Image (cartoon, rainbow, N blue to C red):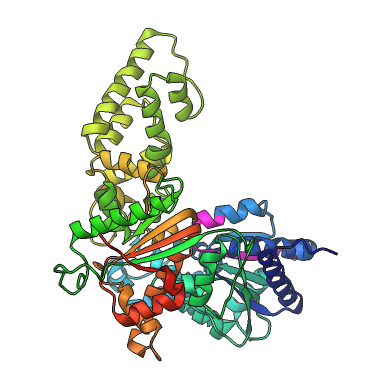
Amino acid sequence: MVNLESPAEEASRIALEEVFACIQAGRSFRLEAGAGAGKTYSLVKALKYLTNRHERDFSRRGQQIACITFTNVAREEIEARTDRHPIIYCDTNHAFCWLLIKGFQKQLKALIEQMPIWQEKLLEAGGVGARDVEYSLGHRAVREHVLSLHHDDVIPLTISLMENQKFRKIMTERFPIILIDEYQDTDKAWVEALKLRFLGQPNSPLFGFFGDHWQKIYGNGCGELNDGAVTPIGKKANFRSVNAVVECLNRMRPELPQFVKDPAEPGRVRIFHTNGWLGQRQGGQHWSGDLPAEVAHQALEATKAKMVDDGWDLAPGQTKILMLTHRVLASEQGYSNLAEAFQYNDSYLKKENRLIAFLVDVLEPAADAYAAKRYGAMFEALGGTVPLLKRQADKAAWSTSFDTLMSLRDNGSVGDVVDHLIASQRPRLPDRVEEMQHHLSAFEVDPSVEMPRPISELQKLRPVAYAEVKALRKYLDGHSPFETKHGVKGAEFENVLVVLGRGWNQYNFGEMLELAGAAAIPVNKRAAFERNRNLFYVACSRPKRRLALLFTQELSQDALAKLRAWFGPPSIEALAF
């Protein structure tokens, strides 16, 4: 019989069979899924396998399978792909932890009293008293009847309660199976508590850890999870990239070799260094050895010219340029002040902030339609219903409101636009967005109450020029060829050009290459090495077909030797520009 499976499909099937075998045997496991392996596919398959096995008994006993995600976006994707099955509880770690601990009010109050960060607030309030503990606002506050927890309180409190045998018993009875997505980025202290209190202990949940420690890019994540009670499973598939790219990844990471879907599919990898440039390079701790900015730009243009000669389509839909951190990119793209308003990039990059989501997804398309005199499309963008405009006065009111809006979009601030919409009600802001404006206006500065992060971020966002919202939208709509490496984990592109240089204190890729080729990595360099290596791996594993790297920093002979080992001598070129 002819085997119709591709090498990648066979590797994927074998990994899933190992996952199912662990589930059948009641053994906790870790699925290590490298770049392009299809981690979420395996997670969803595992969840569907578990719902088929336990639909009746879990429903009867009021039990659920917990699936803990790293982001709300991931939660929504997994819920959609599992049809929101009632025996699956899918949410972020903070939501899961609060669900577990909120019934332990007496213990929570005692623990909060011991937390140094709460001491001053409790002293001013005369102690905890009869107040209930809640977690809804996401900031610390002592009010008449409640103590409101900060996001940063929830996981430490859960870790403390894990010492309580009754708590562990209730957790296990409620969630006999717990799957954790992106385990490598999950809070390190929380994972250590799982290892101490549950893994390998009798009458504990079955844990499934899904992720890839080579793709850990968040500082407080646990990274690689090694525990005798957890069976490691490597998913040796790559459904994203062609063999030319995957062969390089395999040399970079020989312990998890990957197989591609079609070994014959063509592709190419090219590495350019700028060691031949003889001018004065930059100095300083973070810029040492890099090209001057204008020369680096010339090097980038020369590289792009070579890519075009090589058959690359540099249109944004085909090619992504990965460079530096998002703050630098925000400056390049024209929305740096907007970026500074938010603590987390996902608030604006993934539009988790409701105001950003409304402005980018609703107001901007409506404004474009108005400018083009496509009024039906304008009302469709605003919500799909055209208001009844019988009177000329109604039409004039909408026209006046939008004329003012168009001017404010060009010349005003975010706050100017928001205030205009509240005043004119044409169009209306979403209720939750307008409520947040009122919360900001009504917020009274009180030393005993921290300004909630959403309100604080709104306060910082209001003075930002609205033109930056338009720039952000253009970027998010894919009109820009630029991407950040942090923003790109999980994404994939036909062609990828990675620009690697200095200018940031967290990364030095030349030093990373030297350490990768060293006989041993010093203990005090290990964390920095892994941080650099992981980001390098994430960037190099994005393309489907073509990969190019441009090093604007000068590379040592040891660094060049490691590049030759990973990518092959024919791929390494000195850039002439």
Residue 464 in the figure: left or right of residue 390: left
Name the one closer to the observer, 455 or 296.
296
Q: Residue furthest right?
A: 1
Could you tell me which residue is drawn at 53 percent across and 65 percent down? 244
Q: Quadrant of residue 425?
A: top left
Q: Is 191 located above or below residue 217 in the figure?
A: below
Residue 373 drawn at (x, y percent) = 38, 18
Whether residue 35 appears in this view of the structure is no
Could you tell me which residue is drawn at 53 percent across and 80 percent down? 225
Q: Quadrant of residue 89?
A: bottom right
Residue 168 drawn at (x, y percent) = 60, 78
Count of numbered circles in the view: 0
Quarter that holds the N terminus: bottom right
Whether residue 261 appears in this view of the structure is yes
Could you tell me which residue is drawn at 69 percent across and 55 percent down? 85
Name the one closer to the observer, 376 or 143.
376
Residue 115 drawn at (x, y percent) = 36, 76
Residue 280 in the figure: left or right of residue 247: left
Give the magenta range: 60-75
Quarter that holds the C terminus: bottom left
Residue 238 in the figure: left or right of residue 556: right
Could you tell me which residue is drawn at 72 percent across and 78 percent down? 26
Name the one closer to the observer, 275 or 157.
275
Q: Quadrant of residue 96?
A: bottom right
Whether residue 385 is in magenta: the answer is: no
Residue 36 drawn at (x, y percent) = 56, 63
Q: Is 133 located above or below residue 398 in the figure?
A: below
